Image (cartoon, rainbow, N blue to C red):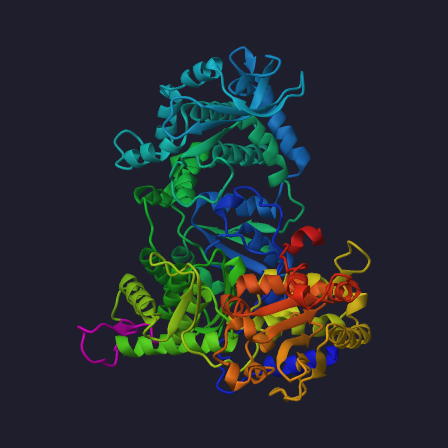
Amino acid sequence: MFEDELRVSKVDVRQQPGETVSGAIPYLPGTLSTQTGPLGRYLPPTSEGVISAWLKQNVPPGEWVLDPFGASPRLILEAAQAGYRVLVAASNPISRVMVELAANPPSEDDLRLALSELAAAHKGDERLEPHIKGLYVTECSHCGQPVDADYFVWERQAPAPYAKSYHCLHCGDTGERSTNEADTRRAAMFSGGGLHRARALERIAGRDDPDRVHVEEALEVYLPRAVYAVFTLINKLDGLTLSPLRRTHLAALLLTACDQANTLWPYPTGRERPRQLTVPPKFRENNIWQAMEQGIDQWATSGSAKLAVWPNPLDEGPGVSLYEGRLKELIANLPQVDVRAVVTAMPRPNQAFWTLSALWAGWLWGREAVGPFKTVLRRRRYDWAWHTAALSAALGSLYTTLSPETPFFGLIAEAEPGFLSSVLIAAERSGFDMVGLAVRADEDHAQITWKRAAQKAPAAAVEEIVAAGKAIQAAKRFLADRSQPAGYLPLHAAALQDLAQNHCFQILDKKTGPAQPAESAFDLTPAENFSQVQAVIKDAFTFREGFTRYEGSEQSLDVGQWWLRTVKETQRPLADRVEMALVRILNKHPGDSFLGLDAALCVEFPGLMTPDHALARVCLDSYGMQDPPGSERWRLRIEDIPATRRRDLNTTRDMIMQLGKQLGFEPALSEHPSPQPGSTAIPYLWKEPGGTIRYAFFVIASAAIGGIVLGLDFPILSLIPASENMAPKSQRPVLAIVLPGGRANLVAFKLRNDPNLRQQVTLGWRFLKYRHLRQLIESPVLNRDTLDEQLGLDPLTYNAPQMRLL
């Protein structure tokens, strides 16, 4: 029965013998905003609602919380709007402006008025707006009339663009077209750079400044026409008499222009989250005036919060107190604030954003605005070892000012093994004990909770072989608990989590000798510490140590999925357990939103077992319906109500028996018991008159096929007499799983994402949908000779659920 499938699955989600749940915290799902916001391609792509949910669970409203990095203005605003007093340290001058404007956003009318005032200014005898638009004029390829280009397309190091995109208001011609000679001539007019390029340099570094060469290198990501456009606008802004607020609003739009003007916009549109100042092979040159017009919607947001710039006091109630400088400098003045928690989006190295921020701050507000942040111009590349050292210094300062047991919640967006290692090692070195770690692998998001230790515990120096052994065992436990292969990120996280919780990040290499008690917390530098940990984990995951990989690559550990070389499955794959849990939750909480259902799933499967977002969506698409349509309120589909499914199961079993008789077989229910108490996964057999089994049909109402295919629910070998074990595959019984058509997409999804299950299925399993079974019974051409062909006429196919849900 359908209820039996749910009941049996409950056994699987409980803690198994030998299973460790230490360090498993529930992942807090949120909503990924469709609006990236200004400069969003450089900011952590965190989900909305996560920080407010964590704060409400852990900190009373009205208390002070600290964001030591200020990497996500959206996160800061969310915390303030949730009722907290948020102290933010922001050393990046552009990040500071973004926090200010997030807390006190301009309206669309404010921005339009500011832009109209700039547009009305003059460049010689010409208004500024038509002058800037004229830089991007072209001719319609259809009617020949002048038209504003939305963008031009260039090849790197080419002397002129080769394509353009526009919408002609005269004839309606729209799209990308080849450039003409006039486009080439207009682009060449700016090739010398001239005074505007010189001003772009002078606003950051004088002629005798040793950093001038770094500014010149950074300017290489701007075409000469873009430099002319940007500095024509900035020069005019400097000359206008404006209120401070109006000037701030124009500066915001000019920030958008500065970003849209660079060449870090790959063509065709691909990954637009640059981390290095590297010009793509092909890129877009955007229309700067259009960019400012489009920036109005990005900067005009609905949220707001009280704002005070440190040391000015923040008024009573929730709000944002912004410190303009590094965390270390803030710490000296922090004792007057009782910080009850730390919340932050962990920063990742971004040479592109940091370097451009220094340029933009100098261009808009002068050299003084750049301040100490100017040092970012000197470094072209940042690696994870460097980042570990930088985070260690910052978190070490943070430790000194917090009270023992103060909670610390960190979000890692775009998580990868190096990033995760850097963060965990730096936190451990700085005196923060990890409480738990959760990873949502398909979104590359990690959430970590620490608490400030009462004192920095001496790091137990461990030998390399001991650390490797811990990493190996932790990874094996993780895969065994998961019961299906996993990508490298959560596997790496399992090893890191174990090393962190056992304070084993100080690793002695073979040349160091036997471990000695450490007098200080760490003898290795942060960079050495990072490199040593990475090497140990990398060398641990080998075939010799019991791991195998599907579709792997010798060049990268991140490619493919990892599994155990030898494994004795004792529980169903995680995807099956998630499916059954979702059905129970949906049945218990009809009318809940996807976010609510997802959160309940994450509570049931915490830590590194966090279900993929895509899996939760596909499961819901299989079982759920929106009631009313489009409401995002979900309930079980009518056909999946247990009583209805019970009737379907009984009818389907009867049809299996009927079809077997029609084809001359002797149908019967297997007499071999299932090893799972209460399991309904007992096949219906079609036998020859002599007793030889030709077909075995497992009739189910779910998509939880792992227990059947892997032999957990029924001993498959019992269907094959010993004398037939060596027989050709064609002479063995056909094994088929009979399931509702509404489960087909979910099964196909599981097979796409679980190579171990897929491999087992290819050994001879077939899938038969209820509806196709009905068609076979009614088919006038069906006989024994055509049966195998007919069984395959309605195969499983996978379609992403997003299209259907929308």
Residue 409 shows in this picture: no
Query: From the viewer's perspective, is 475 left or right of 206?
Result: right
Query: From the viewer's perspective, is 668 left or right of 209?
Result: right
At horizontal 32% and vertical 32% (from top left) the residue drawn is: 216
Q: Main secondary structure of the magenta part?
A: loop
Indicate the position of residue 262 as horizontal and vertical percent values: 45, 33
At horizontal 42% and vertical 58% (from top left) the residue drawn is: 559
Q: Quadrant of the N terminus?
A: bottom right
Picture layout, residue 235 above or below residue 185:
below
Picture layout, residue 288 above or below residue 604:
above
Q: Quadrant of residue 800?
A: bottom right
- Which residue is at the front of the view, 366 or 466? 466
Query: From the viewer's perspective, is 679 left or right of 364?
Result: right
Q: Residue furthest top?
A: 125
Indicate the position of residue 268 as horizontal and vertical percent values: 50, 36
At horizontal 68% and vertical 65% (from top left) the residue drawn is: 743
- Which residue is at the front of the view, 733 or 484? 733
Query: From the viewer's perspective, is 653 left or right of 800?
Result: right
Indicate the position of residue 642 as horizontal and vertical percent values: 78, 75
Indicate the position of residue 767 as horizontal and vertical percent values: 64, 67
- Which residue is at the front of the view, 769 or 300? 769
Q: Quadrant of residue 188?
A: top left
The answer to if 509 sits in the magenta stretch is yes
Picture layout, residue 217 above or below residue 498:
above
Read off the magenta span: 503-522
Residue 653 shows in this picture: yes
Q: Quadrant of residue 765?
A: bottom right
The answer to if 622 sits in the magenta stretch is no
